[in-house]
Amino acid sequence: MHYSYYKRPLLLLLIVYITALVFFYKPGPGKQDISRYIPQKTVTLVGKVIGFPAVKTKSRNVIVKVYSVGSEKAGGYIYARFPQEAPQWHETVEISGTIKAPYSVALLGNFDWAAYLATKGVFSEIKVSDVKPIAPPSWFLRSIARVRSDILNTFEQNFDRSLSAIAGGVLLGERGEMDPELYADFQDSGAIHLLVASGGNVGFVTLVVFAFCALFGISRKKTVLLALVIAGIYTLIAGADAPLTRAYFMTVCTVMGYFLHRNSGVFQGLVLSCLVILLLRPSSVFETGFEMSFLATLAIVICMNVYELPYRWPRWVKFFVQIFMATLSTQLVLLPVFTNVFFKVSFVGLFSNMVLVPMASLLMAVSFAYYVFSCLHIGFLLKGVTWACLWGFKTLVSFFAAQPFASVQAAAWRPGWVAAYYAGLFLLFHLPQKEFIRRAWKPFLAVAVLAVAVQYIFFNAPTVWLLNEWNKNAVLFRTPGGTRLLIGASIDGEKLARAVLKSGGKKLDAVLINQNDAKQLAQVKILQEKITVDRVLVPFEDAWPGDTQNIAGVQVDTLWGILLNKEHALWTNRGYSGAAGQDSVSYALSRKNIDFTVAGNGRFILLNDEIIDNERNRTRAVKL
C-alpha cells in the first residue's frame, strides 16, 4: 500500500473527527430523548422496532426508536423488554409499560450495562405490559424478518442448543443464549469472531454469487449488480449491524469505482464507511465491537496489500498463508483492545483459525443449504451432514481451547503503552516498503517514546480507587512503582480480580482485610484463584491496632475502626469483642509524601483531614 493513501483528505478528516470524539464527546441523551420521562414511572409511547429481538429466557428484547409519548413529541431510543413475542422488525407500535434507567454498576474493570447501551444511543428501558400494532413493516422487510426467523427456528428445532447456536452464529451472527462454557471455549480458542456476522460473511456471499453466475456465463456487469443485490439482502437478514453495514458499503464503493472507471479501493471504502457510521452515531467510537471490527479490517487490508506472496507458490499454500497472515495481523492490532476488555490473550488462535476459518465458510454454506432443503421438505438429505459439520466444528473449538496457553491472563494496558504499541505496529505492517520505512521510522519512533514518557511523567500519580457495589466496599491503591494493595474484600472476588487487572497489574502485593468475617475471607479465596496475592493481612490475627508493617515499600499502620455516624461525624470503634464480623480496623498507609487512611470498612478515605466518600455503584478514582 503506497504511503500516499495516508495523505488522503478523507482519512485525515476521519482521524481528526475520531480524536475530537474521544476527547470531547460523551454519550448522552438529547433534549427530546425518551429518558426524560423516567420520573413518570409508567408511559405509553409510539415507536418503531429497529432491530431483531434478543431471545432471553423470560423475555424478547429489542431496541425501539421513539416518535412520541402520549400526545407529546419525543425522540431517542429505548430498550424494550417484551414478556412474550416482540413486534416485527420495522413495525410501528404503541407500547405501554414501566420505564426506568438501565441497570448500572460502574465497577472498575467490570461490565456496565448502562454504559454499553449508551454506546448505542439508548438511555432508558421499558418493561412492556401492553403493545398495540399501528403500522406493519413493508412487505419486503416482513419477508426479510420472516426468512431470518425461519432459518433460526429450523436450526433450533433440528439440533440441540449448542449446535443450533453455532449454526445461527456462523450464518447470521445470532447465537442466542449459548452455554457459558462453550462461549468461553470460543474466546479461548480465538474463534469468537466466527460467531459474529461480519465482512467475511458478506464477502463469502458475494463470491458465491460470482461463482454461480460464472457457471451460466452471465456478463460481468450483471454479475456485479446481482452480487450487490444478494449481498445486500443477506446484510439485512443478518441484522445490518456495524460490521455488516461497513462491509457492504465497502463493496458498494468498490463497484461504484468499477462503473466510474476509477479505483476507489477497499481502503477508501473502509474509511468512508467508518466516517458515515460515526457521523450517524458518534457514540459508536466507544463501542468495543465497532473498534475491533474497524481495526481488524484495517489491519487485513494493509497487510494483504503490503505483504505480497510469491506468484509461483501453489494456490493451496497461498490460501493457508493468507489465513495465517490475516489472523496474525488481526490479533496483533486487537491485542490492546482485547486485553483491556477481556484481560486475556489467545495464542492458539494463530493456528486454530487456519483450520476454523475455512471450516466456518463450509459450515455457512452447508447450514444455509440445509435450510433451503428443509423449505423443500427434503432437509433429511442434509441433516446428518449438517450435524456432523456442526459437531466437528464444536469439537475442534473445544480442542483448541483446551491447549496450554490457549488463554493467557493479561493486565490492561495504559494509554501511553497503547499509543507506543500502535506506532511500532504501523511500522511493522509496512516493513517491506523500504522507502516508506525510511521516511516514517523517525517520527513514529518519536511518537512511541514520547507517549511512554508522557504516561510516566504526567499520568503516573499514585491512585486510590474507591469501589462500591450495592454498598459493598473495597479500596484499591496503586503506587507509581506498581505496588498494589487492596483494602477490604466485601465485593465478589472475580470482580475484584478484574478491577486489579484493569488497573494495569496481574498481582496484589497484599490484601488488607478490615473485618475478620467469613464473607470477606471467602471472596479473598476466589480472588486468589484469579490473580496472584502475595500476602493476606487478617485483623486481630496478623495485625492488631497499633501494629506497623512494611508491605512492598508502603508503611501500613493498623488502627481501631474509624466510622461515620448519621450526622457524618467520625467516631472510633475501640475494643475487641472476639465475635467474627463484629470488630473492624482501619489502615493508615504512607509512602514518601503519600499519607492517607482507609476507613469505614472501605467506604471512605481520610486525606489531609478531608473525608473522601465513595459513590453508590460507582468507582471513584482519587489521584494523590
Image: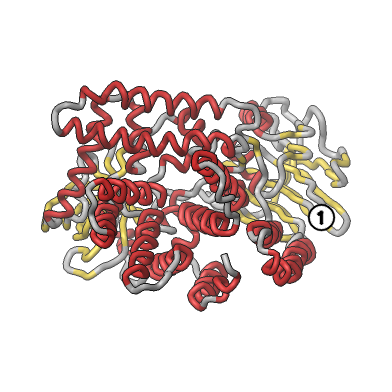
The answer to which of 280 and 133 lies nearer the viewer is 280
Q: Position of residue 261 (x, y in %)?
A: 36, 73
- Residue sitting at the far front: 312
Which part of the image, by quadrant, shows the C terminus? bottom right
Q: Position of residue 357 (x, y in %)?
A: 46, 39
Q: Position of residue 283 (x, y in %)?
A: 44, 63
Q: Position of residue 163 (x, y in %)?
A: 36, 27
Quadrant position of residue 146: top left
Amino acid type assigned to the residue bearing label 1 in the image: Asp
Q: What count of labels does the image hold?
A: 1
Residue name at image x 36 percent, y 34 percent: 363
Please tell me whether residue 382 is drawn above or below residue 113 in the rendered image.
above
Quadrant position of residue 386: top left
The answer to which of 9 and 222 lies nearer the viewer is 222
Q: Is residue 177 left or right of residue 23?
A: left
Which part of the image, by quadrant, shows the N terminus? bottom right
Residue name at image x 20 percent, y 27 percent: 379
User: What secondary structure is found at the residue carrying circle 1?
Assistant: strand
- Residue 622 in view of the camera: no
The answer to which of 220 and 6 lies nearer the viewer is 220
- Residue 47 in view of the camera: yes
Q: Which residue is mark 1?
A: 595
Please tell me whether residue 423 is drawn above or below residue 352 in the rendered image.
below
Disc 1 crowd, CA 10 A, few/some/many (<14, 14-19, 20+): some
Quadrant position of residue 40: bottom left
Q: Is residue 620 left or right of residue 9?
A: right
